[in-house]
Image (cartoon, rainbow, N blue to C red):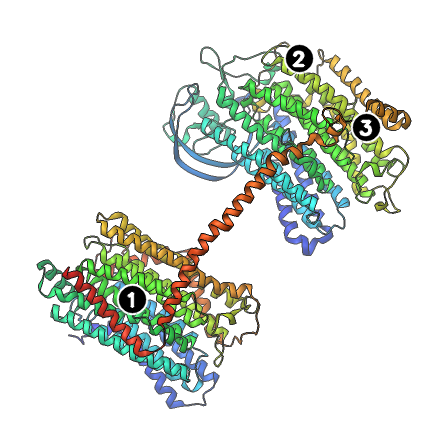
């Protein structure tokens, strides 16, 4: 078998190499062949990811004993691949552990080690990211063909894949932040890829600025984690940065038995998400480990936690949430994602649908032990997720730009994932990640389909300007239909299973526990959102592919199906979008696999309920209800967009949806079409005051500060011009000046001495 | 005893260089081939080889390691045999080597041997000054520098402007020498000896006795300042510099801004910094006043200049002002303190100033031609496009002169200002604090003003387009001298540690303080001690 560490390092290294090669050779040597390094490297990354996933899967299955038991505590697999130490200052600051921790006050090192870690969660993200990226890279070779910035595009894409794979495999909050920013930069570069277009440049700027708000919260969250836990590492390590699992496990045992190693460099530094903190203590203070199997069978551990809850815990979680909201485009920071559609469509598919925007969800899933300690934070996450899902779905109802419909749908689906994370139960997190996984496939499929349409229509993406394309583009039509069915949550396509799992997980929180009422509301809101989703998805589908055939002038006379390099990825994704949810759900392997992630394995299960591990006893009614909801949504869309238009007009007029002003001059239709006026509100509340302030400070700088500086700046030349007049060129004067100078000095001396 | 063999042996790099200079004079007269570019090249190579040989003699044959010991060998009369002397002779040889290269195409073919021979003698003058530990020998060294300089100025170019500049320099130089000698006379009168070691001892004892001959000491100090102030172009003895530089060729202007500066600073360090700190408050106050005056006059006047050499003259004046900061620190620090850093920062600054200035002048020489020198700043417009390497060299030198990291000039200014601030913060005396804080603040303000005119040159080169192309016929010698100087500026900027170390070593040596552990690298000078 391959060495797992090598695989783990290769996964980001290959795209980085491709990025460097394309950047260096692209403009001169590779030119129109610039896609090869990217495709080969990203595919290589995917192969490595798949092998890594398989290896981890096999290790989970193996019985653990002896030395390897330390490595794989309770079937939980963490594979470290230490690379180098970025910063190390020994004894940098004094630090006192919270009272319920094992360690008292001590000196802590400031140490940032670059360590890659593979666990189930990372492996799942890696497989998803590299797989979608491979298909998108192949697709782009067709889509971007002939573009002036061909090599630039593949350089950025490779850089993005490198950053994203690093983001999910680093095991340190600071490095997470670094690559969080790196994917943000790639996103910025790719949104503004066609920077000659003012809209594209503006959209890139908007995405970057809105993300800064989120990153600010994230950074504050990191600071707070730092002061609370005294480290930024996810996992336990030794004080000298050693990550060897066997030695770390030894140190952990020593710590738990009350021994302190003589050598301070051998002391354990408990990682924020590491084993030491994850383990809980029972009433007698004995260490107790609750593994995944116990949770699956309904067992529940004691309640005492090693995590800091209360105000500090809540603050950490909310700050992290702000960061996640920025990156994953959740309310109120969702405004950048629709504009990001100005970038090339493959980028929308890869970065703004499948991978980067899910980084927020990944981050919350990764930090779920922190959220576990704070029910309030869970409620906030769930509320934000539910609200965003509903809001974005409402906006999506009335959009005419096909890509924007998909963008709002992405925001809405990300809302589902946040909702699932907000349950903070093992089932919920697993369901959220499951939805993330299936969503990546069908949303990438839909975006690539939209790109195929846009490609054929000569860059036109307004759905009012084309229709009835099913005959011209049969492959795109068929694959888009599958994607739409998956998104609408139609059984047996993959979206059905994952969305259902999310709603079921929320349902589990409605019975008892904190904020049960809120979760009830959110569950019904999620069901309503499912209805809206089915409607707007098929509205877009029918408007594009059905009805009378209509082609915009920009497409010319040769509107045709896209080339094989584009339809190939579409077909591949279509197959997966159709079956992957069902396969993983029926076998239950996804949840089982993911459950071996350390941070998830220690989550409390919901006692008395079978989880989403393959049994579905209690939740059948939810599945049935959501199936019919999807059916209704599709039916309404079919009636409105395929049925008799006179009927539709009549109903529309009767309901006075479009024209008549309601709600103080704003009809619901207008509200949705104008995206609830978020851009306008932000413009009024933030942009304008800031601009006013900027003008004020500009005036002060220009007139007050500059004036003073210029005044000061005039002094030396003025002095100089005085001096210049002395330089008259007469040697007699110079000699006299020398002698007089000496005499004056002497006179001063004598005067000073005589005084 | 003045002619014992050790003295000869110690001085033999200078003797050899002087002998080779004479051979250049004589040799050319003997062969007298038709003077052309080839003969020029031959004689330049010979002169460069002569300097290199002197360097070889100084370092390898005589054993550079010997000099690293801090000692003044008693019984060798006029000579100071210490690391400071060794370091300054090395700097003189390095600068001299580049000056020879720079002059490879300057001046007229017929006068090549006269020019080069005289240049070598000027270098010998600087080296003798660096080794002198005795007033007469010191004066001899200074005149050994001055007299060849008059000749060189004449040889550079023969037109009215040059003649006027040379005459000015000659008269004023003679006047300054007279003042210096007058000062020496007072020193001799007070101490009854011309040996610097004895003068120092005499000053210390009489200051302890308070009174007597000590009343004459400030007079001597002022006259010494007047005489040396002319050499380094410190106010109010600086007036000649702009006129003379403007009238000279680039090669001669660079010589004027380097060789007398080295000699002047060396004497300032040894005669004022080491021998006369016993003079009390007046000495450092004088240094501060002259420092502030000099750098301010230099910098603000430079702002107005359009002539390149005139600007460089004011730049040279301003840098003398900076170096006086270090001298003031050395004079103000209590004698109990072994290493104040004052002198070492002067030595460090001298080094970085010399090579940045030399690089700039050599590049100007390269860009011009024998009969068409680059005179106005505006003529440099667009050089970055036509001569990118030369422009980069000038830019590096200008950035270094304005003290921008990571170039050598930054470390020089850091050392000077840093030592002034350190002195002010470590002292109890409110007077000292006030004076040195003011000095440091004025110094930093001056450095900021200076950036304006240095960066103007860079701006003209890089952001303006050329009206007419420069001839760029200064020769490869000038080019390589400029490149070597710029490389030195860069290297010292990136790795300043060795220079700091050596400057500190030189300061300890010149004060006659035993080197602390870790600095001393060599064994006892067995060959010299015998």
Tell me if mark 2 has few (under 14), some (14-19) or many (20+) residues whose alpha carbon lies within 10 angstroms of its own.
Answer: some
- The label shown at residue B31 is none
**B315 with respect to B176 (left or right):** right
Q: Quadrant of residue A444?
A: top right
Query: Which residue is disc 2 drawn over?
Result: A610
Task: Output the chain of dot 2.
Answer: A
Task: Output the chain of dot 3.
Answer: A
Q: Is residue A617 above or below residue A431?
A: above
Per the image, label 2 sits on a secondary structure element best described as: loop
Q: Quadrant of residue B246?
A: bottom left
- The label shown at residue B265 is 1
- Determine if residue A61 is in view: no
Most foreground residue, B154 or A715:
A715
**B371 with respect to B270 (left or right):** right
Q: Is residue B36 above or below residue A395?
A: below
Tell me if mark 3 has few (under 14), some (14-19) or many (20+) residues whose alpha carbon lies within 10 angstroms of its own.
Answer: many
Per the image, label 3 sits on a secondary structure element best described as: helix
Q: Residue at x 47, y 86 (%)?
A: B36
Residue A45 position in % (x across, y down): 66, 39
Q: Which quarter of the image is occupied by the C terminus of chain B? A: bottom left
Query: Which residue is disc 3 drawn over?
Result: A538
Which residue of the protein is positioned furthest toward the front in this rendering? A664
**A599 with respect to B437 (left or right):** right
Per the image, label 1 sits on a secondary structure element best described as: helix
Q: Residue at x 32, y 78 (%)?
A: A731
């Amino acid at each position: 078998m391959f060495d797992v560490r090598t695989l783990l390092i290769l996964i980001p290294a290959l795209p980085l190499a491709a990025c460097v090669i394309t950047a260096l050779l692209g403009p001169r040597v590779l030119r129109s062949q610039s896609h090869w390094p990217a495709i080969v490297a990203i595919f290589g990354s995917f192969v490595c990811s798949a092998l890594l996933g398989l290896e981890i899967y096999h290790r989970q299955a193996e019985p653990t004993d002896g030395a390897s038991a330390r490595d794989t505590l309770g079937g939980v697999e963490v594979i470290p691949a230490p690379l180098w130490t970025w910063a190390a200052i020994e004894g940098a600051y004094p630090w006192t552990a919270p009272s319920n921790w094992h360690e008292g006050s001590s000196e802590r090192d400031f140490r940032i080690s670059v360590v890659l870690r593979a666990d189930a969660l990372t492996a799942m993200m890696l497989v998803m990211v590299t797989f979608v990226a491979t298909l998108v890279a192949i697709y782009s070779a067709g889509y971007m063909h002939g573009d002036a910035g061909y090599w630039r595009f593949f350089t950025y894409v490779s850089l993005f894949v490198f950053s994203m794979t690093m983001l999910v495999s680093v095991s340190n909050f600071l490095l997470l932040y670094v690559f969080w920013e790196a994917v943000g930069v790639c996103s910025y570069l790719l949104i503004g890829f066609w920077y000659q277009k003012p809209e594209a440049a503006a959209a890139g700027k908007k995405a970057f600025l809105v993300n800064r708000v989120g990153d600010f919260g994230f950074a504050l969250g990191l600071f707070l984690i730092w002061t609370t836990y005294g480290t930024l590492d996810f996992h336990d390590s030794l004080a000298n940065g050693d990550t060897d699992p066997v030695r770390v496990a030894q140190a952990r045992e020593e710590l738990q038995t009350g021994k302190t190693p003589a050598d301070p460099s051998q002391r354990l530094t408990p990682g924020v998400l590491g084993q030491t903190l994850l383990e809980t203590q029972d009433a007698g203070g004995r260490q107790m480990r609750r593994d995944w199997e116990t949770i699956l069978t309904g067992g529940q551990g004691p309640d005492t936690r090693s995590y800091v809850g209360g105000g500090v815990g809540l603050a950490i979680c909310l700050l992290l949430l702000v960061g996640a909201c920025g990156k994953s485009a959740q309310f109120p920071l969702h405004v950048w994602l629709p504009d990001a559609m100005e970038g090339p469509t493959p980028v929308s598919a890869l970065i703004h649908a499948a991978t980067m925007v899910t980084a927020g969800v990944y981050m919350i899933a990764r930090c779920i032990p922190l959220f576990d300690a704070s029910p309030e934070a869970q409620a906030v996450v769930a509320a934000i997720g539910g609200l965003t899902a509903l809001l974005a779905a409402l906006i999506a109802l009335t959009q005419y730009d096909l890509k924007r419909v998909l963008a709002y749908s992405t925001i809405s689906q990300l809302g589902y994932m946040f909702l699932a994370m907000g349950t903070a139960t093992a089932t919920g997190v697993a369901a959220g990640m499951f939805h993330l996984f299936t969503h990546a496939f069908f949303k990438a499929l839909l975006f690539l389909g939209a790109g195929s349409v846009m490609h054929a229509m000569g860059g036109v993406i307004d759905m009012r300007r084309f229709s009835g394309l099913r005959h011209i583009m049969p492959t795109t039509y068929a694959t888009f239909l599958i994607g739409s069915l998956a998104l609408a949550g139609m059984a047996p396509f993959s979206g059905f299973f994952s969305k259902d799992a999310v709603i079921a997980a929320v349902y589990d929180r409605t019975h008892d526990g904190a904020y049960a009422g809120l979760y009830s509301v959110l569950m019904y809101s999620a069901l309503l959102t499912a209805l809206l989703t089915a409607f707007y998805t098929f509205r877009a589908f029918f408007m594009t592919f059905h009805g009378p055939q209509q082609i915009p002038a920009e497409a010319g006379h040769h509107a045709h199906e896209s080339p094989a390099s584009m339809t190939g990825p579409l077909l591949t994704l279509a197959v997966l979008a159709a079956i992957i949810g069902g396969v993983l759900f029926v076998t239950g392997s996804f949840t089982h696999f993911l459950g071996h992630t350390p941070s998830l394995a220690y989550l409390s299960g919901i006692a008395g309920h079978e989880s989403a591990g393959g049994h579905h006893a209690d939740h059948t009614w939810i599945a049935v209800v959501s199936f019919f909801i999807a059916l209704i949504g599709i039916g309404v869309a079919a009636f409105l967009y395929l049925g008799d238009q006179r009927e539709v007009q009549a109903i529309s007029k009767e309901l006075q949806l479009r024209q008549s002003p309601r709600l103080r001059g704003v009809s619901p239709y207008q509200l949705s079409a104008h995206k609830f006026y978020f851009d306008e509100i932000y413009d009024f509340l933030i942009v304008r005051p800031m601009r006013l302030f900027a003008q004020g400070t500009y005036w002060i700088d220009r007139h007050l500060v500059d004036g003073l500086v210029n005044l000061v700046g005039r002094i030396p030349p003025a002095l100089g011009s005085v001096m210049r007049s002395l330089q008259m060129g007469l040697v007699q004067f110079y000699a006299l000046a020398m002698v007089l100078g000496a005499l004056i000095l002497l006179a001063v001396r004598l005067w000073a001495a005589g005084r | 005893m003045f002619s014992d063999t050790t003295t000869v042996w110690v001085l033999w790099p200078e003797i050899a260089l002087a002998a080779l200079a004479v051979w250049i004079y004589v040799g050319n007269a003997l062969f007298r081939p038709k003077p052309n570019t080839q003969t020029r090249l031959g004689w330049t190579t010979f002169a460069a080889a002569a300097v290199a040989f002197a360097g070889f003699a100084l370092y390898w044959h005589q054993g550079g390691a010997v000099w690293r010991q801090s000692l003044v060998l008693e019984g060798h009369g006029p000579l100071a045999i210490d690391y400071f002397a060794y370091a300054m002779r090395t700097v003189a040889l390095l600068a001299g080597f580049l000056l020879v290269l720079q002059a490879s195409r300057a001046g007229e073919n017929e006068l090549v041997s006269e020019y080069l021979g005289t240049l070598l003698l000027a270098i010998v003058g600087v080296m003798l000054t660096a080794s002198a530990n005795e007033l007469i020998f010191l004066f001899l060294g200074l005149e050994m520098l001055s007299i060849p300089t008059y000749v060189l100025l004449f040889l550079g170019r023969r037109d009215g402007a040059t003649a006027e500049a040379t005459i000015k320099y000659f008269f004023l130089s003679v006047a300054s020498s007279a003042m210096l000698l007058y000062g020496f006379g007072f020193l001799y009168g007070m101490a009854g000896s011309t040996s610097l070691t004895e003068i120092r001892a005499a000053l210390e004892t009489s200051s302890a006795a308070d009174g007597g001959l000590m009343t004459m000491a400030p007079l001597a100090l002022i006259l010494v300042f007047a005489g040396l102030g002319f050499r380094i172009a410190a106010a109010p003895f600086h007036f000649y510099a702009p006129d003379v530089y403007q009238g000279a060729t680039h090669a001669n202007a660079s010589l004027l801004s380097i060789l007398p500066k080295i000699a002047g600073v060396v004497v300032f360090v040894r005669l004022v910094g080491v021998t006369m700190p016993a003079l009390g408050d007046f000495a450092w106050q004088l240094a501060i006043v002259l420092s502030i005056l000099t750098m301010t006059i230099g910098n603000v006047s430079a702002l107005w200049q359009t002539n390149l050499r005139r600007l460089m003259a004011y730049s040279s004046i301003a840098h003398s002002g900076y170096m006086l900061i270090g001298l003031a620190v050395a004079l103000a620090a209590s004698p109990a303190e072994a290493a104040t850093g004052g002198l070492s920062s002067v030595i460090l600054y001298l080094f970085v100033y010399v090579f940045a200035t030399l690089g700039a002048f050599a590049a100007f020489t390269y860009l011009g031609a024998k009969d068409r020198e680059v005179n106005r700043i505006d003529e440099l417009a667009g050089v970055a496009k036509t001569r990118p390497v030369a422009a980069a060299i000038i830019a590096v030198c200008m950035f270094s002169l304005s003290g921008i990291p990571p170039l050598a000039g930054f470390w020089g200014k850091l050392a000077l200002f840093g030592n002034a601030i350190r002195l002010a913060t470590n002292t109890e005396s409110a007077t000292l604090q006030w004076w040195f804080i003011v000095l440091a603040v004025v110094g930093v303000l001056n450095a900021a003003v200076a950036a304006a005119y240095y960066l103007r040159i860079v701006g003209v080169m890089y952001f303006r387009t050329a009206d007419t192309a420069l001839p760029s016929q200064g020769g490869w010698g000038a080019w390589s001298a400029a490149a070597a100087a710029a490389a030195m500026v860069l290297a010292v900027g990136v790795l300043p540690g060795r220079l700091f170390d050596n400057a500190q070593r030189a300061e300890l040596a010149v004060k006659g303080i035993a080197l602390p552990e870790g600095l001393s690298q060599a064994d006892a000078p067995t060959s010299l001690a015998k």
